[in-house]
Amino acid sequence: MINKRKRKRDPYTEVYALGQHICMSPHKARRIIDQIRGRSYEETLMILELMPYRACYPLFKLIYSAAANASHNMGFNEVNLIISKAEVNEGTTVKKLKPQARGRGYLIKRSTCHITIILKNISLYEEYEEYNICSKNRGWIKKMKSTDTTFHDMYSK
């Protein structure tokens, strides 16, 4: 048996929102989740508003709630948020009996799903990428993103 370890979330950069027992098929929700995974928060909201599917509205509310959690609880700016993880799990199935002719009953199955959205703050990662510490020349090296030139300190030759 293979031992699977769950990846621990970083509590300082990640915020999540969980929607349970949403009345839609997990397959239909996954079709939309695959479109928005890895995108920025603002781009995701625009995509969800313009998509013609019924499953977009609960996802829109859930992503909006996750961003509200990020700004209120953690103090993150909504511009720096990306959707790092989005998953859809199968929920319970509601079963109803519809009466048919001759005393029979027809079973109606309403599937539900659980949706988890994890937003990540990328502003901290951009600050680390901007300044890299290099010990080769005994000095600090600042690498600019727009130009790939390197500026050395007083220790450079």
Image: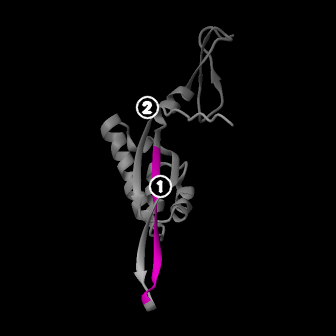
In this orientation, which residue lies closer to the viewer: 86 or 23? 23
Crowd rating for badge 2 (residues with CA inside 10 Å; few <14, some 14–19, many 20+): few
In this view, the residue farthest toward the left is 72
Residue nearest the observer in this picture, 97 or 58: 97
Mark 2 or mark 1, earlier in chain: 2
Residue shown at 49% from the left, 48% from the top: 40
- The magenta stretch is 103-118
Query: Which is the main secondary structure of the residues drawn in magenta?
Result: strand
Q: For numbered disc 2, what is the local secondary structure?
A: loop
Q: Which mark is residue 78?
A: none
| Residue 106: image location, x then y, percent | 47, 80
User: Residue 101, how many percent across, how many down?
Assistant: 44, 91
View extreme (bottom): residue: 102
Looking at the rendering, which quadrant does residue 81 occupy? top left
Secondary structure beneath label 1? helix
Q: Amino acid at mark 2?
A: Pro
Q: Give the residue number, with chain letter if any, for mark 1.
A: 44
Which residue carries the number 2 mark?
11
**Kind of residue indicated by mark 1:** Thr
Image coloring type = one colour
To which quarter of the image does residue 112 belong?
bottom left
Nearest the viewer among 152 and 47 is 47
Seen at 65% across and 27% down, the residue is 149
